[in-house]
Amino acid sequence: MKSLRICNHGHRYYKSSDCPVCPICEAEIKPADGFLATLSAPARRALEHEQITNEEKLAQYTEKQILQLHGMGKASLPKLRQLLDAKGLSFKKI
């Protein structure tokens, strides 16, 4: 069941989960273009939290390390591989 919530910025929204993220605030801070703009919000936040803001930094991690980040799921890996491949990069090998 969805409940009405109000974020610190006064946005009113409904959510059924315990996730505290305001979807309106999230949409306002989503990059318009670039590497992070193509990802889902949880995946983007996971990478931002680790200061992984470009493909070169992403290539310094293994797939296993990326999957261990809170908010990152297996469904994001194909997109991340594609983004790396477009720059001639790949995930770090063990």
Image: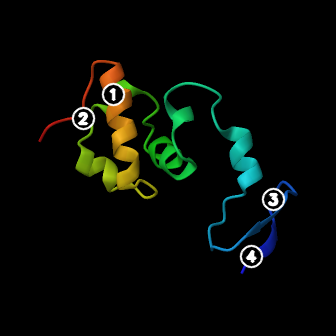
Which residue is found at the position 27% from the left and 33% from the top? 60
Which residue is found at the position 34% from the left and 18% from the top? 87
Q: What element carries label 3?
A: loop
Spatial separation of the CA atoms under disc 4 and disc 2: 39 Å
Q: Which of the marked residues, 1 or 4, is nearer the chain's N terminus?
A: 4
**Residue 35, how many percent across, how many down?**
49, 29
Q: Quadrant of the N terminus?
A: bottom right
Q: Which of the marked residues, 2 or 3, is nearer the chain's N terminus?
A: 3
Which residue is found at the position 32% from the left and 53% from the top? 67
Q: Out of 68 and 83, give the one closest to the viewer.
A: 83
The dot on residue 2 is 4
Spatial separation of the CA atoms under disc 2 and disc 1: 8 Å
Examine the rendered structure and indicate whether residue 73 appears above or below residue 62.
below
Spatial separation of the CA atoms under disc 4 and disc 3: 19 Å
Task: Write down the residue under mark 1.
Answer: 84
Q: Is mark 4 on a helix, strand or loop?
A: loop
Task: Write down the residue under mark 3.
Answer: 8
**Picture quadrant where residue 62 is located:** top left
For marks 4 and 3, give the one nearer the viewer: 4
Please report contact status of discs 2 and 1: CB closer than 8 Å, yes or no. Answer: yes
